Image (cartoon, grey):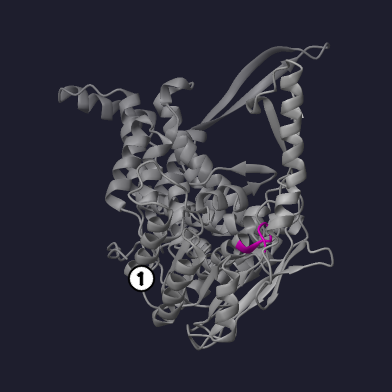
Amino acid sequence: MTSKAPLAADAVPVPDLLCDEAEVRVDLDELHQTLAFAFALGTSLDAFERVLAAAALPSSTWDRKDFERDIFLEDLVTRALRIRIGGRTVAPCLPYLLRAISEPPADLRVVTFRQRILAELAGSPELRRDFERIYQRLVALRAAFCAEGGSRRGGDTHRRLEILRIVQEVVDDLAGAFAGATSGVARIRAFGIAAKESEAYQQLEALLDHERHLGTVDLRVRVGVDGTLRTFQIVRIRENQDNPLHTSAIARFFSRLRLFLRGYRVTPGEVTERLLDDVFSGMERPVALLFQLLGDMEFYLAGLGLADLARDKGLPVCLAELVPPGEAGLVIDRLYNPLLLAGKSKPVPSNLGTAHGDAVVIVTGPNSGGKTRLLQSIGLAQLLGQAGLFVTAERAVLPQLAGMFVSLIEEARSDQPEGQLGMELLRIRRLFEELGFGSLVLLDELCSGTNPSEGEEIARLVISLLPELKSPVFLTTHLLTLATHLEDEPPVPHLEFLQVDLDENERPTYGFRPGVAKTSLAHKTAARLGVTRDELAALIAKKKRAESLGERPLPSSRRVARPIVPEKSAGAPERRRLRVTRR
């Protein structure tokens, strides 16, 4: 965590929604420069997003590079954690939101602080409406800073007045919103009240009142029998003398005369510009804090968006109960993969639990049975739970862990230094090199890149050492003989086994139960994809007939594979049946 920014004695409270103790986490110096430039000339959205993306966050021991690729972190944010207000999707500051989610706080008090805010917003439609309305006002304020003055009537002066009007509206709204809030949301109201009572706001209010109400003109209007205006007469003109910025016409004349005699020629426009700059300078700090608030609000709106998406599919969400690591195993009821919520089908939830906090769980079962999706779901649940967001489950009791290492996807690269086995061994070494004690480990297809006998030897070595990390471990394997031997003679104390649950027709239900699978059902997968002796022989015979008749076989590039995608589950990758047709 970076050092706290110094606060003046009369400074307004900090509307920090991500820390249990409010802090200024943006670089105020850089943001002040950005705001001054934007108020004068306008700027780009990127200028504000760069400042917000670099904002400090609570201390975390998690390293994003150890898991972001394999759990599709960016897809999670853009597909499942979408911000929707009034039926419209709003684009957040993605770099900041990704950091806020992927760097779970080490202090449990911070997690609890966030959970209380999210629970209060989800449980109170009125508070959520206030939250969404103020967020939209802040987005409008940012858009006003990014607008170019010359493109609007009145030029820069009009644009600056518009910015100041929005600032006034935001402060007024903040001061009146969130009545009765008991969570950290109450900080927003306290910030608004303090800002409204400040001397700088009084000057802002006087300026805008002076601009809107310089004076009052009484008219006498004469209307004809046809209802049209015939004549009007000015009866009286009254200047708004109650405004502190009011000066009489005589005083204005002598002020200009004195400046002229001193050699200065100041136009009314120049005086107005100077006045606008002075008023904005007084409000610059509260406005800067509004941009930190904007980023923090997107964190909670993303969490609420996930809950809305789940509710539309008839699925539950919950706030995780975090317990000290090593005391007990994890328990997750009706777990499902949030990445599947954006699809047309409904994910199938599954129950999961371990007896010990440092258990090594080996998952076996057929291809397309949901093993990889299960590991991904566990990782996402742990990440979201420790970040303080909703978990896609009905109930989740999770250990508070120091990090996460996920290796689910090993794609061949043209520049890779080793073959498949070598790359797999390198990822295992990286696991032991980089991961701290008490972190979640998720490994897919352990030692699948070599022959079974050598793969078993390496897998035994890895499994025997994993408990030394004092971490919960979930790994999948197709080495069923190895899994059976380990079940009969466990080499480590807390070794547990899960297998894909099958129905009476040996089809995956996408649930999991204790034990080791007896077969990977490779023959059924081959039959489903048309890789049987009869079907392959028929393809060869077809080619021979075409050749004997002098026909040219249809190139494989002209064949189209149409996937048939059934329901997906927490643990299931997409199952596909290929139908080959001619174009």
456 in relation to 537, above or below: below
496 inside magenta stretch: no
Is 513 situated left or right of 320 in this image?
Answer: right
The magenta segment: 366-371
Is 164 situated left or right of 256 in this image?
Answer: right
Residue 3 coordinates in the image, percent (x, y) = 27, 65
Residue 319 coordinates in the image, percent (x, y) = 61, 71
The foreground one among 429 and 175 is 429
The residue at 56%/59% (across/down) is 300
Do we see residue 400 in this rendering? yes
Is 520 situated left or right of 101 in this image?
Answer: right
71 in relation to 542, above or below: below
368 inside magenta stretch: yes
Residue to which mark 1 is pinned: 432
Secondary structure of the residue carrying tag 1 is helix
Is 97 situated left or right of 573 in this image?
Answer: left
Residue 228 coordinates in the image, percent (x, y) = 76, 12
Amino acid type at mark 1: Phe
